[in-house]
Amino acid sequence: MNFNELNLEPRILHGISDRGYTEMTAVQEQTLAQTLHGMDVAVQSQTGTGKTAAFLITLFNCMFNSSAPKRKKALIIVPTRELAVQIEKEARLLNRHLGLAIGSFYGGVGYATQLALLKKGLDIVIGTPGRLLDLSERGQLNLKEIRILVIDEADRLFDMGFLPDIKKLLRKMPPRNIRQNMLFSATLNRFSKKIAAEHMNRPVFIEVTPERMTVDTILQELYHVKSHIKMNLMLGLLKAQAPQNALIFTNMRHSAFRLSKKLQHNGFRSQHLTGDLPQNRRLKIIDDFMAGKFALLVATDVAARGLHIDSLEMVINYDLPQDCENYVHRIGRTARAGNSGKAISLASEGTADHLEAIESFIGMKIPVQTADIDLYATDESLGFSPRKRFQHDRSNKNNRANFSPRNKQRNKSHGRPNRGGNGNGKWKA
Ligand code: ADP
Ligand code: MG
């Protein structure tokens, strides 16, 4: 169904068509069918299905259609700064012909600019729970004025322990029956259902059949590879397939850091994105990646959650995710809203369990590729990593002089590259 078929204010439609949207996504169609009539909704739908525009268009419509003398104010609660920034960007694009005042609020930045913004008076406030609560407790954000509430990525908010903060925020808002409420989540768990029951007005539950749709448009490939040559295989794949950009996932922060450094040593433009980086740095990295200033972003699940990168060509699971849902989240970064994309997974020793869980979750076997020996590329960063250097030394059998006692010790704790694992059953990239 086309957006034009909705009875929307022409300036809203203008913004939508400027943004390049013509057909509604499934979740947009089902959500708007309710929310444009003032209904509350609790929506379950995978990432990348267009939830942001679904609630933004609702807000806009509500603000412009209301006969109330004062324009209605909206609050959007999100789990992370990155998501706040992304929603603000999308809102500004769609707002082009509307002139609404929009601001986002999150921790880690000074109060001065945020206070100035609030003083001006905002129509749409986007923020993370902690900072919103802070501002409201200081008397700088008046939640009593909120008439439209969006809780986005509810599952993530609850995972991150924000439930108490959200409850506090809800108590500072006017009663639910004078608000329109929308909740969005990749999964509607018991917390979402509790919020829906206690703080929303008999919401319509919308479920857009998820995973298959997301993964169907993605070309998935799986390589079985020993962990000590995983890097060589990934380098070879990157060289052979030369994606414009790729998002590479590791399971742990330090692996993301090290992998990115190694990629740099191998001549790739690469950065890492992990939750421990200061917020300004994270935002800069995301912006630069989206602007194409570097090609490879190595990230952990937490850092990449909710990241929206248009036209991402490839996702690589350098480590297979431990949680099968994360597999869908990860590969769903590519092939967003109908584009196709490619997802390559590298499975090493010890991840057979993960693989089985993933395949049963997505309801299909990931097609296995065999890598020709020529595909493995030399890792130029051998001098960089102590462990790699050790393996290098060891493979050079004639060079026994390099086989120092220290390396022998390391052999005991880390070695056995051919048998895999690192002795303690944990991942260490
Ligand atoms: P979600 O919140 O469900 O994860 P987003 O709202 O971030 O998804 O949308 C994912 C991508 O789809 C974004 O790049 C967005 O610009 C694009 N998109 C959203 N709606 C449409 C549409 N109707 N037509 C084309 N692209 C769309
Ligand atoms: Mg979203």
Image (cartoon, rainbow, N blue to C red):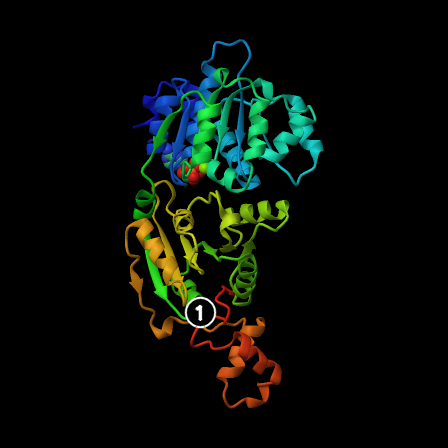
Compared with 251, 333 (above or below) is above
In this rendered view, identify the residue nearer to me: 51 or 189: 189
Q: Position of residue 200 (x, y in %)?
A: 46, 23
In this rendered view, identify the residue nearer to me: 24 or 304: 304
Q: Residue at x 70, y 33 (%)?
A: 111
Q: Please indicate whether residue 374 sits to the left or right of residue 92 in the image.
A: left
Q: Position of residue 344 (x, y in %)?
A: 38, 58
Compared with 232, 33 (above or below) is above
Q: Secondary structure at mark 1?
A: helix
Q: Please indicate whether residue 274 sits to the left or right of residue 135 in the image.
A: left
Residue 310, picture quadrant: top left
Q: Position of residue 345 (x, y in %)?
A: 38, 59
Q: Position of residue 243 (x, y in %)?
A: 41, 57
Q: Residue under circle 1?
A: 227
Q: Residue at x 67, y 23 (%)?
A: 119
Specify whether residue 218 is in view.
no
Instruction: Report the image quarter containing ligand 1.
Output: top left
Q: Classify the position of the N terminus by image quarter.
A: top left
Give, as a three-letter code, the residue at label 1: Ser
Specify whether residue 164 is in view.
yes
